[in-house]
Image (cartoon, helix red, strand yellow):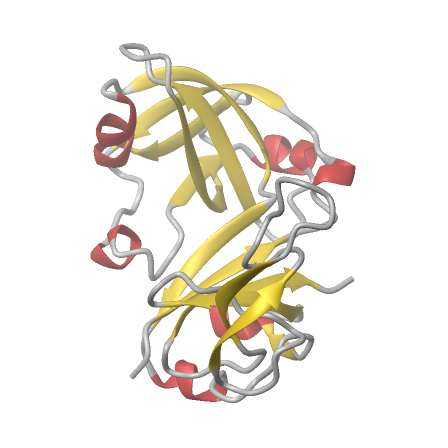
Amino acid sequence: MPDFKIVVSDPEAPKKEVVLKVKVVGDPDVEYTDRVKEKFELPKIKLNPETINRLGARHGVVTIRMRRPDTGDKVKITGVVVPDSTVPEGEARVNSEQMINLTGVNELEGEIFRARAWQIRINDERTNSLIGLKIGEEIGGEIIGLKGVKLVITGGSDNSGFPMRSDIHGPVKKRVLLSGPPGFHPAESGERRKKTVRGDTISGDIVQINTMIKY
Protein backbone atom coordinates (compact mmCIF):
# COMPACT_ATOMS: atom_id res chain seq x y z
CA MET A 1 0.00 0.00 0.00
CA PRO A 2 1.14 3.61 -0.53
CA ASP A 3 2.74 5.44 2.36
CA PHE A 4 1.18 8.91 2.58
CA LYS A 5 2.22 11.82 4.77
CA ILE A 6 -0.90 13.88 5.47
CA VAL A 7 -0.07 17.52 6.27
CA VAL A 8 -2.89 19.39 8.03
CA SER A 9 -3.05 23.20 8.15
CA ASP A 10 -5.38 25.00 10.55
CA PRO A 11 -6.16 28.41 8.98
CA GLU A 12 -8.04 29.55 12.10
CA ALA A 13 -5.06 29.03 14.44
CA PRO A 14 -3.04 32.19 13.60
CA LYS A 15 -6.16 34.37 13.97
CA LYS A 16 -6.90 33.06 17.47
CA GLU A 17 -3.38 32.37 18.66
CA VAL A 18 -2.66 32.56 22.39
CA VAL A 19 1.00 32.07 23.29
CA LEU A 20 1.77 30.97 26.85
CA LYS A 21 5.11 30.70 28.59
CA VAL A 22 5.65 27.20 30.01
CA LYS A 23 8.27 25.10 31.69
CA VAL A 24 8.66 21.99 29.54
CA VAL A 25 9.47 18.91 31.64
CA GLY A 26 10.46 15.46 30.45
CA ASP A 27 8.34 12.75 32.08
CA PRO A 28 8.98 9.02 31.51
CA ASP A 29 5.30 8.30 32.22
CA VAL A 30 4.16 10.21 29.12
CA GLU A 31 3.44 7.66 26.39
CA TYR A 32 6.01 7.48 23.57
CA THR A 33 5.31 4.47 21.36
CA ASP A 34 6.94 3.17 18.20
CA ARG A 35 3.99 4.54 16.26
CA VAL A 36 4.77 8.01 17.58
CA LYS A 37 8.46 7.64 16.72
CA GLU A 38 7.53 6.57 13.17
CA LYS A 39 5.08 9.52 12.90
CA PHE A 40 1.93 7.42 12.57
CA GLU A 41 0.61 9.22 15.66
CA LEU A 42 1.27 12.57 17.28
CA PRO A 43 3.12 12.57 20.62
CA LYS A 44 1.22 13.24 23.84
CA ILE A 45 1.59 16.51 25.78
CA LYS A 46 0.21 16.59 29.33
CA LEU A 47 -1.27 19.92 30.42
CA ASN A 48 -3.38 21.24 33.23
CA PRO A 49 -7.04 21.54 32.06
CA GLU A 50 -6.97 25.29 32.77
CA THR A 51 -3.94 25.71 30.51
CA ILE A 52 -5.78 23.83 27.76
CA ASN A 53 -8.78 26.15 28.12
CA ARG A 54 -6.57 29.23 27.89
CA LEU A 55 -4.91 27.97 24.71
CA GLY A 56 -8.22 27.41 22.93
CA ALA A 57 -6.81 24.42 21.06
CA ARG A 58 -10.04 23.53 19.28
CA HIS A 59 -8.72 20.31 17.76
CA GLY A 60 -6.58 19.32 20.74
CA VAL A 61 -3.27 19.82 18.94
CA VAL A 62 -0.63 22.24 20.25
CA THR A 63 2.95 23.19 19.47
CA ILE A 64 5.72 23.76 22.01
CA ARG A 65 8.57 25.98 20.83
CA MET A 66 11.97 25.95 22.60
CA ARG A 67 15.64 26.69 21.99
CA ARG A 68 18.41 24.17 22.55
CA PRO A 69 20.64 25.49 25.34
CA ASP A 70 23.83 24.27 23.63
CA THR A 71 23.27 25.67 20.13
CA GLY A 72 20.41 28.15 20.45
CA ASP A 73 18.57 26.37 17.61
CA LYS A 74 14.79 26.48 17.65
CA VAL A 75 13.09 23.14 18.22
CA LYS A 76 9.41 22.22 18.29
CA ILE A 77 7.15 19.48 19.56
CA THR A 78 3.65 19.31 18.08
CA GLY A 79 1.36 16.90 19.85
CA VAL A 80 -2.05 15.98 21.23
CA VAL A 81 -3.04 17.48 24.57
CA VAL A 82 -3.79 15.16 27.47
CA PRO A 83 -5.62 16.86 30.37
CA ASP A 84 -3.96 16.12 33.74
CA SER A 85 -4.92 18.10 36.83
CA THR A 86 -1.72 17.00 38.60
CA VAL A 87 0.35 19.03 36.13
CA PRO A 88 0.84 22.57 37.49
CA GLU A 89 -0.38 25.51 35.42
CA GLY A 90 2.50 26.96 33.45
CA GLU A 91 4.03 23.52 32.90
CA ALA A 92 3.92 21.07 29.99
CA ARG A 93 5.04 17.48 30.29
CA VAL A 94 6.38 15.49 27.35
CA ASN A 95 8.12 12.15 27.16
CA SER A 96 11.59 12.40 28.70
CA GLU A 97 13.27 10.39 25.91
CA GLN A 98 11.78 12.67 23.28
CA MET A 99 12.71 15.78 25.28
CA ILE A 100 16.36 14.78 25.75
CA ASN A 101 16.76 13.66 22.14
CA LEU A 102 15.39 16.98 20.93
CA THR A 103 16.96 19.46 23.36
CA GLY A 104 19.72 17.62 25.25
CA VAL A 105 18.11 18.44 28.62
CA ASN A 106 15.11 17.28 30.64
CA GLU A 107 13.72 20.72 31.55
CA LEU A 108 13.57 23.89 29.50
CA GLU A 109 11.61 27.12 29.26
CA GLY A 110 9.41 27.38 26.19
CA GLU A 111 6.23 28.67 24.62
CA ILE A 112 3.06 26.78 23.79
CA PHE A 113 0.27 27.66 21.37
CA ARG A 114 -2.46 26.13 19.19
CA ALA A 115 -0.78 24.23 16.34
CA ARG A 116 -0.88 25.89 12.94
CA ALA A 117 0.06 22.69 11.09
CA TRP A 118 1.03 19.09 11.74
CA GLN A 119 1.51 15.83 9.86
CA ILE A 120 0.57 12.17 10.21
CA ARG A 121 1.69 9.12 8.20
CA ILE A 122 -0.73 6.46 7.03
CA ASN A 123 0.15 3.26 5.17
CA ASP A 124 -2.80 0.95 5.77
CA GLU A 125 -6.22 0.42 4.16
CA ARG A 126 -7.05 4.11 4.68
CA THR A 127 -4.73 5.00 1.79
CA ASN A 128 -7.05 3.27 -0.71
CA SER A 129 -9.76 5.86 -0.05
CA LEU A 130 -7.39 8.65 -1.11
CA ILE A 131 -6.32 7.23 -4.47
CA GLY A 132 -8.11 9.09 -7.26
CA LEU A 133 -9.10 12.13 -5.21
CA LYS A 134 -8.27 15.55 -6.62
CA ILE A 135 -7.11 18.93 -5.35
CA GLY A 136 -10.17 20.77 -4.02
CA GLU A 137 -12.01 17.65 -2.92
CA GLU A 138 -12.81 16.94 0.72
CA ILE A 139 -12.00 14.02 3.00
CA GLY A 140 -13.21 13.20 6.50
CA GLY A 141 -10.81 14.13 9.26
CA GLU A 142 -11.48 10.76 10.88
CA ILE A 143 -8.82 9.35 8.56
CA ILE A 144 -6.23 10.94 10.86
CA GLY A 145 -8.24 11.06 14.08
CA LEU A 146 -10.01 14.43 13.67
CA LYS A 147 -13.65 13.55 14.31
CA GLY A 148 -16.32 15.76 12.81
CA VAL A 149 -13.81 17.71 10.71
CA LYS A 150 -13.59 18.10 6.95
CA LEU A 151 -10.20 18.43 5.25
CA VAL A 152 -9.82 20.08 1.85
CA ILE A 153 -7.02 18.70 -0.34
CA THR A 154 -4.83 21.67 -1.34
CA GLY A 155 -1.90 19.93 -3.03
CA GLY A 156 0.92 17.48 -2.47
CA SER A 157 4.12 16.11 -3.92
CA ASP A 158 5.50 12.84 -5.28
CA ASN A 159 8.46 10.68 -4.26
CA SER A 160 10.81 12.88 -6.29
CA GLY A 161 9.54 16.12 -4.76
CA PHE A 162 7.54 17.24 -7.80
CA PRO A 163 4.46 19.20 -6.63
CA MET A 164 0.86 18.64 -7.60
CA ARG A 165 -0.90 21.40 -9.53
CA SER A 166 -4.63 22.00 -9.81
CA ASP A 167 -4.36 23.12 -13.45
CA ILE A 168 -2.80 19.83 -14.63
CA HIS A 169 -5.51 17.17 -14.79
CA GLY A 170 -5.13 13.51 -13.90
CA PRO A 171 -2.55 11.36 -12.05
CA VAL A 172 0.20 12.39 -14.46
CA LYS A 173 3.71 13.80 -14.45
CA LYS A 174 4.41 16.50 -17.02
CA ARG A 175 7.01 19.08 -17.94
CA VAL A 176 5.17 22.36 -18.46
CA LEU A 177 5.88 26.07 -18.77
CA LEU A 178 5.21 27.78 -15.44
CA SER A 179 5.03 31.41 -14.38
CA GLY A 180 4.46 30.84 -10.66
CA PRO A 181 4.06 28.35 -7.81
CA PRO A 182 3.66 25.54 -7.08
CA GLY A 183 6.69 24.17 -8.88
CA PHE A 184 8.34 27.48 -9.76
CA HIS A 185 9.04 30.69 -7.86
CA PRO A 186 10.09 33.38 -10.34
CA ALA A 187 12.91 35.70 -9.31
CA GLU A 188 11.64 38.41 -11.64
CA SER A 189 8.19 39.55 -12.73
CA GLY A 190 7.10 37.82 -15.91
CA GLU A 191 9.75 35.07 -15.69
CA ARG A 192 8.64 31.66 -17.02
CA ARG A 193 10.38 28.28 -17.01
CA LYS A 194 9.69 24.68 -17.89
CA LYS A 195 9.36 22.52 -14.79
CA THR A 196 8.24 18.98 -14.02
CA VAL A 197 5.04 18.80 -11.98
CA ARG A 198 2.33 16.35 -11.02
CA GLY A 199 -1.33 16.51 -11.94
CA ASP A 200 -4.22 17.26 -9.61
CA THR A 201 -5.07 13.61 -8.85
CA ILE A 202 -3.62 11.48 -6.05
CA SER A 203 -1.88 8.29 -7.20
CA GLY A 204 0.41 5.74 -5.61
CA ASP A 205 3.40 7.89 -6.60
CA ILE A 206 2.31 10.73 -4.31
CA VAL A 207 3.98 10.70 -0.88
CA GLN A 208 2.70 13.94 0.68
CA ILE A 209 -0.87 15.20 0.66
CA ASN A 210 -1.47 18.76 1.85
CA THR A 211 -4.83 19.51 3.43
CA MET A 212 -6.56 22.40 5.19
CA ILE A 213 -9.26 22.23 7.84
CA LYS A 214 -12.56 23.50 6.44
CA TYR A 215 -14.50 26.00 8.53
Occupied quadrant, residue 23: top left
Q: Position of residue 202 (x, y in %)?
A: 49, 80
- Residue drawn 29% across and 47% down? 31
- Residue drawn 34% across and 67% down? 159
Residue 159 relative to residue 179: left or right: left
Q: Position of residue 73 (x, y in %)?
A: 37, 19
| Quadrant location of the C terminus in the rendered image | bottom right
Residue 123 relative to residue 203: left or right: left
Q: Nearer the viewer, residue 164 or 33?
A: 164
Q: Nearer the viewer, residue 85 or 146?
A: 146
Q: Is residue 143 above or below residue 114?
A: below
Q: Is residue 33 visible?
A: yes
Q: Position of residue 199 (x, y in %)?
A: 54, 78
Q: What is the tally of numbered marks visible in this picture?
A: 0
Occupied quadrant, residue 166: bottom right
Q: Is residue 88 visible?
A: no
Q: Position of residue 40 (x, y in %)?
A: 34, 62
Occupied quadrant, residue 183: bottom right
Q: Is residue 183 above or below residue 19?
A: below
- Residue drawn 37% across and 82% down? 204
| Quadrant location of the N terminus in the rendered image | bottom left
